[in-house]
Amino acid sequence: MYPLCEDKTFLALVKKFYQGSLNFSLQPDDIQQMTWTWQEKFLNHTFNNELIKKYPVNKKFSRLFLKKLINFIESSQEIHDDFYSQICNLMSSEIDQDDFYYRHYVIGNDFNNTIIIKETKNTVVNGTTGMKTWEAAFVLSDWALCNKEFFKSKTILELGSGVGFTGITVTKLCKPSLFLLSDCHNEVLNTICDNIRINFHQLNETEQADVIYFNGEESSLGVTMLDWNDIGDMPQNIVPDIIIGADIVYDPVILEPLCNVLDYFYNKNKELEVFIASVIRNEDTFAAFLKTLDSKSFQYEELQPAKSIYIDWDHSTKICLIKIKRK
Ligand SMILES: C[S@@+](CC[C@H](N)C(=O)[O-])C[C@H]1O[C@@H](n2cnc3c(N)ncnc32)[C@H](O)[C@@H]1O
């Protein structure tokens, strides 16, 4: 199972490994404690952990992670034999075919709240950007976890869910009554279903009106095709209290259809609240989005999310979280 211990450096490093991040550095004091026994414990919680074996992290990343760790500690510590055997195993395996792998996102420092996501590191796969978790998803989820009560017992619709990190995290920890994840790409929708099955074990699966439901006692999830360009084919029997979206404002062509979707759901529920987190890659595209909102009688307010309270995200990325309401 996941580690339980007080050693902050150990936990931070295990967390980086689970999340597929090479962004770590070690101080001489940290290295002093990384004895053979420490290394063995690290291996038990990472490479030899049953969940990591079942849902492995990216192989190339694992090799680079071990090499980096060895580089830091080899001048002060004897290196555990298993570190080298792991590197050899990784070098002899089929690294190039490692398109899909798993990331284990630890929420806060509680390893029992770990979200496992099957995803790829590729920006575009089969014509969709939805096969990896994007930075805005971390910001939106972190903010939602800081506002758990707001989401509790609500019906939430997510637009452009991608592999499902936000929906799964919010459902697990904020307990909405229904969280409906949506996207326009079949492979993305199948991956969302895989990820729901990995992270929730006792949900009863049913299908109704083009929505796959995963029914739980307190919260249920739904997965459905929802293409913003197809306003005539919105899910009929869903009336969301809240709509959320992460990194869905990036293509000038979809700004109008996206705002039409918001309009459609506002017409079903005048109390609807919408929260969208966007990485600002192109100021003009984001400005055009705000202008389109304005032209459709929406107003917006920029929120200032606290930084990495439960979920680590890159504070150097320019990300804007807005709340949208009818004027
Ligand atoms: C950059 S990804 C963001 C995925 C996820 N929200 C995240 O932040 O990790 C954009 C997502 O929007 C979806 N998308 C793009 N155009 C869409 C459309 N017309 N209708 C519905 N979803 C769309 C893509 O399939 C993709 O999953």
Image: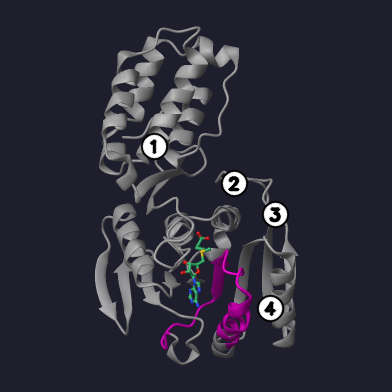
Q: Look at the picture and state if 233 lies above or below 194.
A: below
The answer for how far apart the CA atoms under marks 1 and 2 are is 22 Å
**Display colour scheme:** one colour
Q: In the rendered view, does 187 fall on the left or right side of 258?
A: left
Membership of 246 in magenta stretch: yes
Q: Which mark is residue 318?
A: 3
Q: Is mark 4 within 8 Å of ligand 1?
A: no
Kind of residue indicated by mark 4: Lys
Q: Is mark 2 within 8 Å of ligand 1?
A: no
Secondary structure beneath dot 3 equals: loop
Residue tagged 2: 313
Span of residues in magenta: 235-263
Q: Are marks 3 and 4 in contact (CB under 8 Å)?
A: no
Q: Look at the picture and state if 245 lies above or below 63.
A: below
Q: Nearer the viewer, mark 3 or mark 2?
A: 3
Looking at the image, the residue that sits furthest to the bottom is 232
Q: Quadrant of the C terminus?
A: bottom right
Secondary structure beneath dot 2 equals: loop
Q: Are marks 4 and 1 in contact (CB under 8 Å)?
A: no
Q: Which mark is residue 126?
A: none
Q: In the rendered view, does 171 fall on the left or right side of 46?
A: right
| Comes first in the chain, label 4 or label 1 | 1
Q: Look at the picture and state if 32 lies above or below 87.
A: above
| Comes first in the chain, label 1 or label 3 | 1
Secondary structure beneath dot 4 equals: strand
| Comes first in the chain, label 1 or label 2 | 1
The answer for how far apart the CA atoms under marks 3 and 4 are is 23 Å
Q: x, y (%) of residue 164?
A: 43, 61
Q: Is mark 1 within 8 Å of ligand 1?
A: no
Residue tagged 1: 60
Q: In the rendered view, does 327 fall on the left or right side of 230?
A: right
Kind of residue indicated by mark 2: Trp
